[in-house]
């Protein structure tokens, strides 16, 4: 990977973190332990900073102490373009789970065909939050996270018969749109509503001067990836995985 490609990867990676900020971040060497007590792994895992290697044993032990003090199992997030020693972690009993892909798009044109039932707001409506919390209950952690976002923020929703059926939000960081929390009510899937919702965010970002966009999607979610390709997210920037520390009763 060239230096410019690595730079773009780090730009998108750090923008995604800013678009879903943790409540607490503690630096350990060239890594940062993120925590907010929610089920979200991105905000409750040890993450590398630009130029990081390792994590070294000292960094790992510091992270394990950090998470143990909060009653959590240590999770380390590894980026495939950043230097890390997965073998060393495996030798310590860590096991890899789940691969997520970070996709990138150039915003060269507006997305056509956005209907009047798709609207944009500077705050999350009651219906927007209701759908999010029905699909991902977390005792208010998501609402608290939204309050920590400092960059320009836009919420999109698409309704069916006055019912919020599809949602997403976008954060603009300089020239880059970060798309987050894309979800559609199971009763309304397969109707192209997510395309309307995310497309509206893309059009908003272009009006704000953004020329590129990024989002993250679980590798196994083929329908979502097909949707994003149709919206112009045709470049795989990098993937990442989570390494889970062994449970106390695990054997080596």
Image: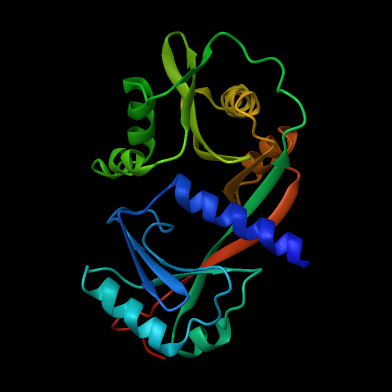
Colour mode of the rendering: rainbow
Along the line of sight, the residue nearer the viewer: 84 or 221: 84
Whether residue 77 is visible? yes
Q: Residue at x 46, y 49 (%)?
A: 18
Residue 199 image position (x, y, % from top left): 63, 26
Residue at image point 53% right, 55% down:
14
User: Is 100 placed left or right of 244 in the picture?
Assistant: right
When asked about the image quadrant of residue 25, the answer is bottom left
Does residue 220 sit above or below 227 in this rendering?
below
Spot occupied by residue 119 in the image (x, y as percentages of width and height): 50, 16
Q: Indicate the position of residue 173 as horizontal and vertical percent values.
A: 54, 42
Q: Quadrant of the C terminus?
A: bottom left
Q: Quadrant of the N terminus?
A: bottom right
Residue displayed at 33% across by 35% down = 133
Asked if residue 2 is positioned above or below residue 59 in the image, the reply reads: above
Is residue 247 or residue 233 the one in the foreground? 233
Where is residue 125? Give x, y as percent.
35, 21
- Figure check: 108 above or below 95: above
The answer to whether 155 appears left or right of 25 in the picture is: right
User: What is the total number of numbered labels drawn onto the structure image?
Assistant: 0
Residue 219 in view in this figure: no
208, 134: nearer the viewer: 208
Q: Is residue 45 above or below residue 92?
A: above
């Amino acid at each position: 990977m060239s230096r410019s490609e690595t730079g773009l990867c780090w730009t998108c990676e750090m923008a995604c973190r800013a678009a879903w900020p943790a409540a607490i971040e503690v630096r350990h060497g060239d890594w940062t332990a993120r925590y907010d007590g929610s089920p979200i792994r991105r905000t409750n895992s040890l993450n590398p900073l630009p130029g990081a290697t390792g994590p070294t044993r000292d960094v790992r032990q510091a992270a394990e102490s950090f998470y143990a003090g909060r009653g959590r199992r240590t999770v380390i997030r590894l980026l495939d373009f950043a230097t890390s020693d997965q073998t060393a972690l495996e030798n310590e009993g860590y096991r890899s789970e789940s691969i997520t892909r970070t996709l990138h798009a150039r915003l060269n044109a507006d997305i056509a065909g956005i209907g009047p039932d798709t609207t944009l707001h500077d705050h999350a409506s009651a219906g927007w939050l209701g759908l999010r919390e029905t699909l991902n209950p977390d005792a208010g952690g998501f609402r608290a996270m939204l309050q920590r976002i400092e960059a320009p923020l836009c919420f999109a929703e698409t309704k069916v018969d006055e019912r919020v059926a599809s949602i997403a939000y976008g954060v603009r960081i300089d020239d880059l749109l970060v798309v987050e929390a894309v979800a559609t009510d199971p009763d309304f899937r397969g109707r192209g509503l997510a395309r309307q919702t995310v497309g509206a965010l893309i059009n908003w970002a272009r009006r704000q001067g953004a020329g590129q966009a990024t989002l993250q999607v679980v590798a196994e979610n083929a329908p979502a990836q097909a949707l994003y390709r149709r919206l112009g997210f045709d470049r795989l920037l990098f993937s990442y995985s989570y390494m889970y520390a062994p449970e106390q009763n695990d054997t080596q």
